[in-house]
Image (tube, rainbow, N blue to C red):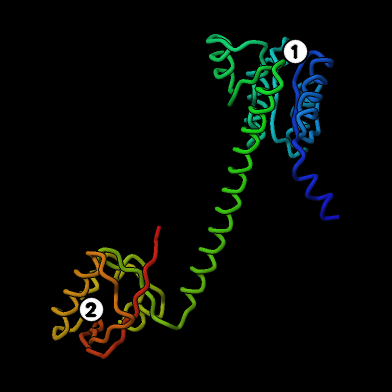
């Protein structure tokens, strides 16, 4: 079962747009003879192109010069689907005009139709780039979900937590605001952390911030006196951790 899933994942799914059935089959044979498993789809109309690209996990669209299916039309149908399907122009010869025409029609690459080595190298390179983009999108989704969970955890934490950038508040949770007597983050947004430090510890804490700004490591913890909004001074322990904030 696992092997079948692996084989399916490695299979190259290609949509071949070509007026000639024989030419399309020759391209498929070239890919298979190169040791690449391929599942071809050959649409017969614009409607079928749309149906294939919206219902199948197509990896690549291979488009020959066609009277029935101009490359620009295929490119627009792919764009309309919203899917990341690289379009590769299949040509008999590569010259300046062929390259410019293919790229103007939305092709990501140009492959020599009757040169097996070139055709295979182009298809495999575009497939590899596609897989990299897919992995990146999956990682971005995972990162956003992790950030969402971290944000929810920080917001609900009973520990006072704040993000400080260049000495200014850019984020603080409810426990932090309550500790200083503020009702909302707007009350502290952009406020220097030094404004919350008691006078007797102001100078030493300022030196610590300068050292950290120069890249020196923060201490595991730092004890000082802080000042609430109403002026009440209380002892506190700060713990530092580097973070990226967007």
Question: Could you tell me if the residues under marks 1 and 2 are in contact, i.e. CB atoms within 8 Å?
Answer: no
Residue 105 visible in the current orientation: yes
- Position in image of residue 65 (x %, y %): 69, 12
Q: Which residue is mark 1?
A: 68
Please state if 168 lies on the left or on the right of 51 as rendered: left
Badge 2 marks a residue whose secondary structure is: helix
Q: Which residue is mark 2?
A: 196
Q: Quadrant of residue 199?
A: bottom left
Front label number (1 vs 2) = 1
Look at 68% across and 23% down and name the residue there. 117
Q: Position of residue 120 (x, y in %)?
A: 69, 27
Does residue 9 appear to the left or right of 138 in the view shown? right
Vertical order, 196 against 63 (above or below): below
**Residue 184 appears anywhere in the view:** no
Query: Between residues 79 and 26, which one lies in front from this camera angle?
Result: 26
Query: Badge 1: few (under 14), some or many (20 or more) residues near its Cα, within 10 Å?
Result: few
Q: Residue at x 40, y 57 (%)?
A: 246
> Where's residue 155, x and y in %?
46, 73
Q: Is residue 144 left or right of residue 189?
A: right
Q: 10 Å neighbourhood of mark 2: few (<14), some, or many (≥20)?
A: some
């Amino acid at each position: 079962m696992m092997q079948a899933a692996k084989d399916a994942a490695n299979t190259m799914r290609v949509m071949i747009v070509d007026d000639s059935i024989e030419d399309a089959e020759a391209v498929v044979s070239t890919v298979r003879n190169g040791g690449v498993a391929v599942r071809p789809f050959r649409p017969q109309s614009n409607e079928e192109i749309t149906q294939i690209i919206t219902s199948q996990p197509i990896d690549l669209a291979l488009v020959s010069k066609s009277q029935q299916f101009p490359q620009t039309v295929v490119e627009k149908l792919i764009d309309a689907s919203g899917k990341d399907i690289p379009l590769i122009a299949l040509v008999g010869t590569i010259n300046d005009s062929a390259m410019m025409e293919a790229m103007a029609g939305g092709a990501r690459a140009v492959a020599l139709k009757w040169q097996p080595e070139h055709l295979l190298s182009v298809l495999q390179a575009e497939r590899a780039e596609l897989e990299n983009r897919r992995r990146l999108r999956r990682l971005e989704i995972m990162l956003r979900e992790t950030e969402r969970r971290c944000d929810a955890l920080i917001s609900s934490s009973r520990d006072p937590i704040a993000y400080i950038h260049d000495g200014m508040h850019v984020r603080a949770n409810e426990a932090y605001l309550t500790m200083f007597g503020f009702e909302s983050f707007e009350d502290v947004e952009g406020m220097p952390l030094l404004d919350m430090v008691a006078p007797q510890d102001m100078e030493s804490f300022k030196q610590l911030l300068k050292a950290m700004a120069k890249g020196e490591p923060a201490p595991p913890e730092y004890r000082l006196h802080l000042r609430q909004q109403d002026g009440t001074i209380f002892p506190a322990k700060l713990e530092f951790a580097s973070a990226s904030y967007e």
